[in-house]
Image (cartoon, rainbow, N blue to C red):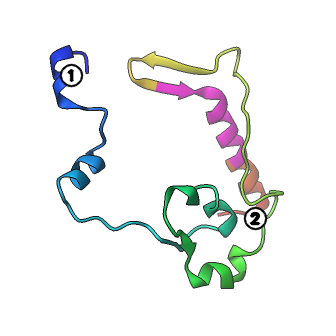
Amino acid sequence: IKNMAIQKYSNMEQSLFTRFIRLGVPAVELDRLGRSRSSIAELYNWRYKNLGNLPHVTGQPQYQTANTGFPFDFQLVDVGDFNGVGESEPNPYFYQNLAEAEYVVATYMYMRLLGYK
């Protein structure tokens, strides 16, 4: 927010969800996951109290085996700069990272070649 008076009194750095909770709007806290592997859920279970998995996640084989062509359940990749440029802001409040975009497209093409649909 560019107007300092509005910025000071509106408290816009607070999320809308936080505002709703503060006003007493009922909310449901996540405590079970059903669409993510257990190993991936462990990345963010610190954020929720007693976060666990639904029974089908621990019982069905598609949640137990790795994805074809990928050595791990999840990949964390450090993408270098593309043509000497990392994250850029071509327009105000519009951020882009062309190296990450190229990497995602290459990964998608790789998955298509493996037979993913």
- In the picture, residue 104 is in which quadrant? top right
- In the picture, residue 64 is in which quadrant? bottom right
- Dot 2 and dot 1 residues touching (CB under 8 Å): no
Closer to the camera, 92 or 54? 54
Q: Where is residue 81 in the image (x, y as percent from the top left)?
A: 70, 22
Q: Position of residue 2 (x, y in %)?
A: 25, 16
Q: Residue 108 vs residue 26: left or right?
A: right
Q: Position of residue 63 (x, y in %)?
A: 68, 74
103 is within the stretch colored magenta: yes
Position of the C terminus by quadrant = bottom right
79 in relation to 15, above or below: above
Give the labeled residue for mark 2.
Answer: 67
- In the picture, residue 66 is in which quadrant? bottom right
Q: Give the range drawn in magenta.
A: 95-107
Q: Residue at position x 66%, y 69% from top?
A: 38
Q: Residue at position x 64%, y 34% from top?
A: 100
Q: Residue 116 vs residue 41: left or right?
A: right
30 in relation to 105, above or below: below
90 in relation to 103, above or below: above
Q: Residue at position x 15%, y 17% from top?
A: 5
Label ID, residue 8 = 1
| Predominant secondary structure, magenta span | helix
Mark 2 lies on a secondary structure that is loop
Q: Where is residue 62 in the image (x, y as percent from the top left)?
A: 70, 76
